[in-house]
Amino acid sequence: MIQVNLITGFLGSGKTTTLLHLLAQKPEGENWAILVNEFGEIGIDGALLAESGAVLKEIPGGCMCCVNGLPMQVGLNMLLRQHQLDRLLIEPTGLGHPKQILDMLSAEVYQPWLTLQASLALLDPRQLSDARVRTNENFRDQLAAADIIIANKQDRWQEEDRQALAQWQAEALAGRLLVSTEYGRIDPALLAQPRRNLRTLPQSEAHQHTHPGSGLSALRLDRNARWRRAFNQGQGYYACGWAFDSDTLFDTIGILEWARLAPVTRVKGVMRIAEGAVSINRQGADFHIETRQTPPPDSRIEIIHDSEADWNQLQSELLKLRLSDKT
């Protein structure tokens, strides 16, 4: 039986960082897989998780838990057919609703193969003071569906964030486990906790967005194309991302400043630079960069914002940062 955990959390709560921490502690000899879904079409998390040692299946485009769950079923069935797994970690988009995923994993057809264990929800308590996030239906339902709440980014909290978390805990935790941490550093033993939350959740009516891509694999460059842009929108959010070929290098300081200063909510990417490669992760004013040991096969960067942005201007500034062929 494959042990399965759902790892949810709103935009920027630290899901991918948590996954990397868990995978670094994977028991020797066990075969783990990650089924990851992103709101945007570019597919950033695949590059971030490429060195994790786990089997990886990407479903970009915000599609995992809609269209009757078909993209997730396809991805899940491919993993089951092609690999002998001990554990499967599923990371839906930060704008995803968990109900349909949990219902599907609990379906009779998968019972001979899967054992659904604790569902974990990452929470940045600072978001509890953001009315737009706090009233978001998916944000509320992710927390309601979880068996364990991971209050992440503890190093960034202020006193008002601790108070907001304490108030939420008193009102909504309902006897579930709450773990406070930073950088997603949680005990892997949490994954073995049983699934206890059996409450019925309503299906979100707000979970709607466009489907410009296939919904089954990350964007790839067309033959001879040096770069490509992709766009997605839904639930009041907009995503615009770019992929560049392996020969395109970026000015290190320039790309970091572009990501830091872009007037948007979220920036995430893995970029090839003269020194090798750098991963970029920005949520609001939080800005984290990390050098990569192995350069990715291409460069990918994506922006998510809660309103339309000047994508063409941002693109123009980004293209100017290329060190190689300017075409």
Image (cartoon, helix red, strand yellow):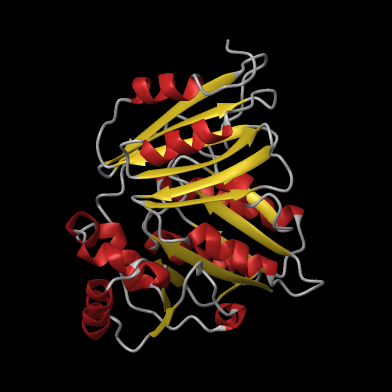
Of all residues, the one furthest to the front in this rendering is 253
Q: Residue 286 appears at what percent x and percent y?
A: 39, 54
Residue 41 seen in the current view: no
Please tell me whether residue 227 is drawn above or below residue 187 in the rendered image. above
Q: Nearer the viewer, residue 291 or 170?
A: 291
Residue positioned 69% across, 37% down in the render: 275
Q: Residue 292 appears at what percent x and percent y?
A: 67, 47
Q: Quadrant of residue 208?
A: top left
Q: Nearer the viewer, residue 28 or 207?
A: 28
Q: Nearer the viewer, residue 115 or 297?
A: 297
Q: Is residue 160 left or right of residue 40?
A: left
Please tell me whether residue 162 is drawn above or below residue 44 in the rendered image. below
Q: Is residue 273 left or right of residue 301?
A: right
Q: Residue 283 appears at what percent x and percent y?
A: 38, 51
Residue 309 seen in the current view: yes
Of all residues, the one furthest to the top in this rendering is 327
Residue positioned 59% across, 28% down in the render: 250
Q: Which quadrant is home to the C terminus?
A: top right
Q: Residue 116 appears at what percent x and percent y?
A: 55, 74
Residue positioned 64% across, 34% down in the render: 272
